[in-house]
């Protein structure tokens, strides 16, 4: 039973390009969360999704960032027109729908904007 | 704005000694408190999920307690071993944001052999 799979592990983009980060949740988990870790900072919540629904996007920057979790396929975090300040580690986590379970985290995608 | 505070930020402990650290969170609208262990170059791993005031959880040499009325949780490690070196994160959920975990900055623990 594979855990949460994130790819790519490392992503380098030039300023102005688009970054697409993928996350496949653990089997049986219907809830997906994206967190960002900026250098020297902790994990900051970005967005919480269920299949085909964004439940809470209160942590997403208002512009250039979007997320989806389609009926088929992985969850995607998309960053358009990347800037240097977007350089960070992006972690995806998943959980089952029941209360009382911790999150299972992926290994993260380290985005570097040059 | 929800704020989860962890102290100390970092801690050096001699192998074999016991240690503990603190997580403070808002006591109103409490829903759940999580502890995670995050080793370097790996991803955070869930240790405990606690929901009731007075909860105590144990896994091997690691245990945690919860006081929701005063808004704090303690994590204890008994007889520290080098493999306990990691960052320990606590995270908090409110009733309103029931599925959204807010993380503290973590306590970075280093065990000296």
Image (tube, helix red, strand yellow):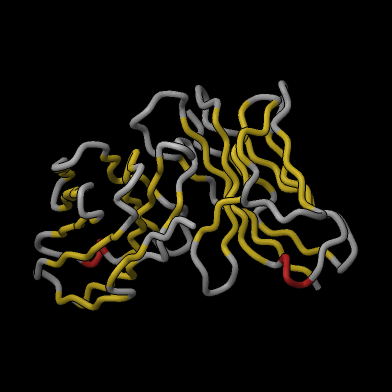
Q: Is residue A48 left or right of residue B112?
A: right
- Compared to residue A13, the image places residue B14 above or below, namely below
Outermost residue to the front: B28
Outermost residue to the right: A16
Residue at the image point whose x is 45% and y is 36% from the top: B98
Residue A21 image offset from top left, x and y in percent: 72, 48
Counting the numbered discs, the total is 0
Q: Is residue B85 left or right of residue B60?
A: right
The quadrant holding residue A13 is: bottom right
Residue at the image point whose x is 16% and y is 40% from the top: B55
- Compared to residue A92, the image places residue A84 above or below, namely below
Residue A85 image offset from top left, x and y in percent: 73, 71
Residue B57 image offset from top left, x and y in percent: 17, 42
User: Which is more toward the observer, B24 or B103?
Assistant: B24
Residue at the image point whose x is 90% and y is 64% from the top: A16
- Compared to residue A41, the image places residue A28 above or below, namely above
Quadrant location, the C terminus of chain B: bottom left
Residue at the image point whose x is 15% and y is 44% from the top: B58
The quadrant holding residue A54 is: top right
User: Which is more toward the observer, A61 or A87?
Assistant: A61
Q: Is residue B77 left or right of residue A78?
A: left
């Amino acid at each position: 039973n594979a855990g949460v799979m994130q790819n790519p592990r490392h992503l380098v983009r030039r300023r102005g390009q688009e970054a697409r980060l993928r996350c496949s949740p653990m089997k049986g988990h219907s809830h997906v969360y994206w967190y960002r870790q900026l250098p020297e900072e902790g994990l900051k919540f970005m967005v919480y999704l269920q299949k085909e629904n964004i439940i809470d996007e209160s942590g997403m920057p208002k512009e250039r960032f979007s997320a989806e979790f389609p009926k088929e396929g992985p969850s995607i975090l998309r960053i358009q027109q990347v800037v240097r300040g977007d350089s960070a580690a992006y972690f995806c986590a998943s959980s089952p729908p029941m209360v009382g379970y911790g999150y299972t985290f992926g290994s993260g995608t380290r985005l570097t904007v040059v | 704005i929800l704020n989860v505070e962890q102290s100390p930020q970092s801690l050096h402990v001699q192998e074999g000694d016991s240690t503990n650290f603190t997580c403070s969170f808002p006591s109103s609208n409490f829903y759940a408190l999580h502890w995670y262990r995050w080793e370097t170059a790996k991803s955070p791993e869930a240790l405990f999920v606690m929901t009731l005031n007075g909860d105590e959880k144990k896994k091997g040499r690691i245990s945690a307690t919860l006081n929701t009325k005063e808004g704090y949780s303690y994590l204890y490690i008994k007889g520290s071993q080098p493999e306990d070196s990691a960052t320990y994160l606590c995270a908090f959920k409110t009733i309103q944001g029931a599925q959204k975990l807010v993380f503290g900055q973590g306590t970075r623990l280093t065990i000296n052999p």
